[in-house]
Image: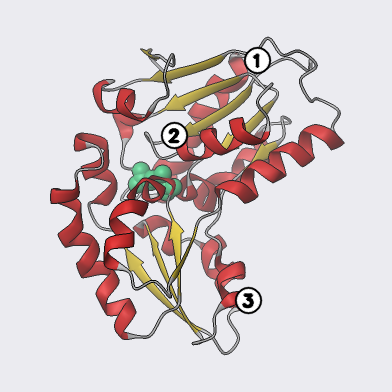
Amino acid sequence: MANNYPIGLFDSGIGGISIYNEIKKTLPNESTIYLADNLNAPYGKKTNEEIIHLSLKNTQKLIDLNCKLIVVACNTATTNAITILRENFDTPIIGIEPSIKPAILNTKTKNIGILATEKTLSSNLFQQTSNKFSDGINIHEQIGYDLVSIIEKSGVNEELLIGKLKDYIEPMLEKNIDNLVLGCTHYYFLMDILKKILPSGVRVLDSSSAVSKRVKQVLEVDNIMSRTKDCKNEFYCNGNESVIKKFLGQGERINKIIF
Ligand code: DGL
């Protein structure tokens, strides 16, 4: 695989743009292709089989577009499908999982909270990771019902989101959490609203910088780091483009395609 081929990323919609932004900060010379499968969002309520099917489809599309490495920029797809993706493709695949371990290492109150989709929280991978590190720590799980659907439809609309977020976060605060793990890439964009709800002592953790470090490491080890500064960033969706546009940087364009 040629070094200047792109890194491919996919998510059910705009969430993975938080991972894309972090990767571009760490690796500005890498070309990227971002797929937002927003026709099929949200993934969080789908069956395990449906998530696997969609993840295989997205990965195949990125490989057809000559991607040298795939980032599953979605916790739901990672926790439900990454093993099968790795069995089906030879291309290196990096996923994102909730930052449970750093939260457990950091907690003083021995109570941490995690906000994620239904299918991430119910996945074997998530349950195994939590059980492995959680000795003596209470992990308070909360499904972020409707959050992804609202963000995909209306962007980060505080009026629509703040009430739901309060309903999800306040019971965790009553349990004395001091670390809140964001287990869905869409929730990264809720940081400003979360700051209004959370007391200053509660640390919010997401996994985007861990993923970008891992991408860099794999590119180095596999010797496929870009050798040109002439990079290109492409964005594709298969549903409505209007909300995604708001999350892209200046000069970045989204194209609608069938995949
Ligand atoms: N960004 C996806 C995640 O990290 C959202 C899942 C969904 O579409 O429900 O889990």
For the residues marked 2 and 1, what is the alpha-carbon distance in whole angstroms? 19 Å
Q: Say which label, 2 or 3, has the lower sequence index.
A: 2
Residue 243, given in percent of the width and then of the height, sits at 26, 28
Q: Which residue of the protein is positioned furthest toward the bottom in this rendering?
A: 136
**Element type where label 1 sits in the image:** loop
Q: How many residues crowd around disc 1 within 10 Å: few (fewer than 14), some, or many (20 or more)?
A: some
**Element type where label 3 sits in the image:** helix
Check the picture and name the quadrant holding the N terminus.
top right
For the residues marked 1 and 3, what is the alpha-carbon distance in whole angstroms? 39 Å
**Foreground tag (1 vs 3):** 3
Q: Say which label, 1 or 3, has the lower sequence index.
A: 1
For the residues marked 2 and 3, what is the alpha-carbon distance in whole angstroms? 34 Å
Residue at screen point 29% across, 46% down: 148
Return the residue at label 3: 105
Using the rendered image of the protein, determine whether residue 83 is visible from the camera's viewpoint: no
The amino acid beneath tag 1 is: Asn
Circles 2 and 3 in contact, beta carbons < 8 Å? no
Name the one closer to the observer, 95 or 185. 185
Residue 135 is marked as: none
Name the one closer to the observer, 254 or 258. 254
Q: Which residue of the protein is positioned furthest toward the front in this rendering?
A: 200
Residue 110, given in percent of the width and then of the height, sits at 51, 86
Residue 242: quadrant of the picture: top left
Q: How many residues crowd around disc 2 within 10 Å: few (fewer than 14), some, or many (20 or more)?
A: some
The amino acid beneath tag 2 is: Leu
Residue 54 is marked as: 2
The amino acid beneath tag 3 is: Leu
Q: How many residues crowd around disc 3 within 10 Å: few (fewer than 14), some, or many (20 or more)?
A: few
Q: In the rendered view, would you say 137 is above or below 106?
A: below
